[in-house]
Image: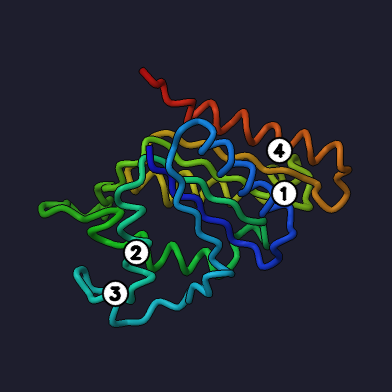
């Protein structure tokens, strides 16, 4: 299978990048092709120009490449920190510019006003790995866990991706080396559960 992996963190020595490397290595060890994108290293422009909004608009080469890959992906892995209950701006801009009509979803003729699109992505599953410095219980009870709603319901659910799992690792700032190693082992296990080793005959 072909898996698109997106990491959005400005520091290459961050734990987010460790997660991304671990996931990519496990996917390749399992026999999958991985299209990796570090949005900060690529200098991905998060601003959506008005000229890109219409369906069929001409797209810059980098955006067009991302669109082509996500449309063909059999799986998606997203890695980012929880910043104010949201993805980093560069990743939100990636969503705006890449998960576009005709690529990730479309509205069908005869819609009776609900405005519910038809998902176009063929990916069988999407995994989202987050880091956070907020306790999980506080994230749920005080803030309502907005990232779960954003990724599961507002994005991948509407774009046709049926399999979804999100895992938040925290509190990262106080995590020991042993704890981080355990978290990375969990990343491998989650990758295995959704994208197991390819059976070779």
Q: Secondary structure at mark 1?
A: loop
Pointer 2 or 1: first along the chain: 2
Numbered tag placed on residue 6 in the rendering: none
Q: Position of residue 169 (x, y in %)?
A: 72, 43
Query: In the rendered view, would you say 46 is above or below 74?
Result: below
Q: Residues within 10 Å of mark 4 (few under 14, many from 20)?
A: many
Relative depth, front residue between 180 and 142: 180
Relative depth, front residue between 184 and 32: 32
The answer to which quarter of the image holds residue 63 is bottom left
Marks 2/4: CA–CA distance: 29 Å
Mark in the foreground, 2 or 1 = 2
Judged left or right of residue 1, residue 144 is: right
**Residue at mark 4:** 184
Image point 46% across, 41% down: which residue?
A: 126
Q: Secondary structure at mark 2?
A: helix
Pointer 3 or 1: first along the chain: 3
**Residue at mark 3:** 59
Marks 4/3: CA–CA distance: 36 Å
Callouts 3 and 1 close, C-beta under 8 Å? no
Q: Quadrant of the N terminus?
A: top left
Image point 42% across, 37% down: which residue?
A: 125
**Residue at mark 1:** 142
Q: Residues within 10 Å of mark 2 (few under 14, many from 20)?
A: few
Q: Position of residue 102 (x, y in %)?
A: 23, 59
Q: Position of residue 183 (x, y in %)?
A: 74, 37
Image point 33% across, 76% down: which residue?
A: 60
Marks 2/3: CA–CA distance: 9 Å
Q: Residues within 10 Å of mark 1 (few under 14, many from 20)?
A: few
Mark in the foreground, 3 or 1 = 3
Numbered tag placed on residue 65 in the rendering: 2
Pointer 2 or 3: first along the chain: 3
């Amino acid at each position: 299978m072909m898996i698109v992996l997106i990491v959005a963190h400005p520091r290459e020595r961050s734990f987010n990048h460790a997660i991304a490397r671990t996931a990519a290595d496990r996917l390749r060890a399992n026999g999958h092709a991985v299209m990796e994108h570090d949005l900060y290293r690529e200098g991905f422009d998060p601003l959506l120009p008005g000229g890109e909004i219409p369906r069929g608009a001409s797209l810059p080469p980098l955006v067009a490449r991302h669109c082509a890959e996500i449309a063909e992906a059999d799986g998606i892995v997203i890695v980012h920190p929880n910043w104010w209950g949201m993805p980093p701006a560069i990743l939100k801009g990636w969503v705006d510019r890449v998960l576009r009509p005709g690529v990730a979803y479309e509205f069908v003729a005869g819609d009776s006003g609900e405005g519910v699109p038809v998902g176009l992505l063929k990916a069988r599953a999407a995994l989202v790995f987050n880091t956070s410095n907020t306790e999980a219980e506080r994230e749920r009870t005080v803030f309502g866990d907005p990232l779960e709603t954003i990724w599961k319901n507002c994005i991948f659910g509407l774009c046709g991706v049926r399999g979804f799992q999100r895992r938040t690792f925290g509190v990262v700032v106080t995590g020991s080396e042993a704890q981080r190693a355990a978290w990375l082992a969990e990343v491998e296990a989650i990758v295995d559960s959704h994208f197991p080793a390819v059976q070779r005959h």
